[in-house]
Amino acid sequence: MKTCVIYYSRTGNTAMVAKTLAEELNADLIEIKDLKDRKGFLSSFKSSIDALRESKTPISPERVELSEYDLIYIGTPTWAGKPAPAVITFIDRADFLGKDVIPFTTMSRQGGEGVIERMSEKIRARGGRIVNFFMQKTGGKELIQVREDTLKLMAEKDLKIYSSR
């Protein structure tokens, strides 16, 4: 089974979770980059509105060929309580048909549930099957602690089982 971890991050925290997953699962790591310049509160607010639109955010890469992957992890920090606009744009352009997908967010349960729900809804609309999900609070933690917490979470949720099917 071939696995990839796709993520968007403006902080080291989401990147550290994604990198830990990829390393532990022997998976490919793919970073989505948001090409829009977003500065200040007003821009962040407009960005959260972008997250509700489809294919509006310029991203790189524009599309990733997912046909070789059986399992796809896709993660995001939250953006005003929504998935990062770049992640929504990516999902809207991806073909998840027949793929097992595990969405994750680096946010506490309170804000993360809505993010997971939104991502899951979009992934299902693109043909994917949600087989698991997780939320990890990373705010204010050192990267070493984020890595340790990710390894602990993987053991608790038995995420490694998906890489050995």
Image (cartoon, rainbow, N blue to C red):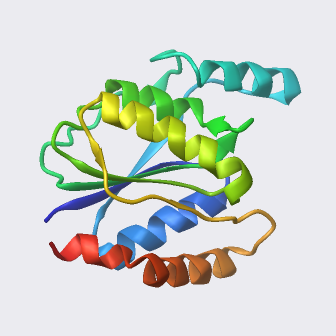
Residue in view at x 75 percent, y 35 percent: 80
Up the image or down, 31 lies above or below 37; here it is: below
Up the image or down, 64 lies above or below 142; here it is: above
Residue in view at x 68 percent, y 58 percent: 109
Tell me where residue 53 appears, x and y as whole percent: 54, 16
Nearest the viewer among 104 and 148 is 104
Nearest the viewer among 130 and 14 is 130
Tell me where residue 120 appears, x and y as whole percent: 43, 41
| Picture mark count | 0
Q: Which corner quadrant holds the N terminus?
A: bottom left
Residue in view at x 24 percent, y 38 percent: 96
Tell me where residue 116 appears, x and y as whole percent: 53, 46
Residue in view at x 61 percent, y 79 percent: 149
Tell me where residue 145 appears, x and y as whole percent: 68, 81
Is residue 68 visible in the rendered image? The answer is yes
Nearest the viewer among 46 and 103 is 103
* Quadrant of the image occupied by residue 84: top right
Q: Which residue lies furthest to the right in this view?
A: 41
Up the image or down, 65 lies above or below 142; here it is: above
Question: Does residue 144 appear to the left or right of 129 in the view shown?
Answer: right
Q: Which corner quadrant holds the C terminus?
A: bottom left
Is residue 61 visible in the rendered image? The answer is no
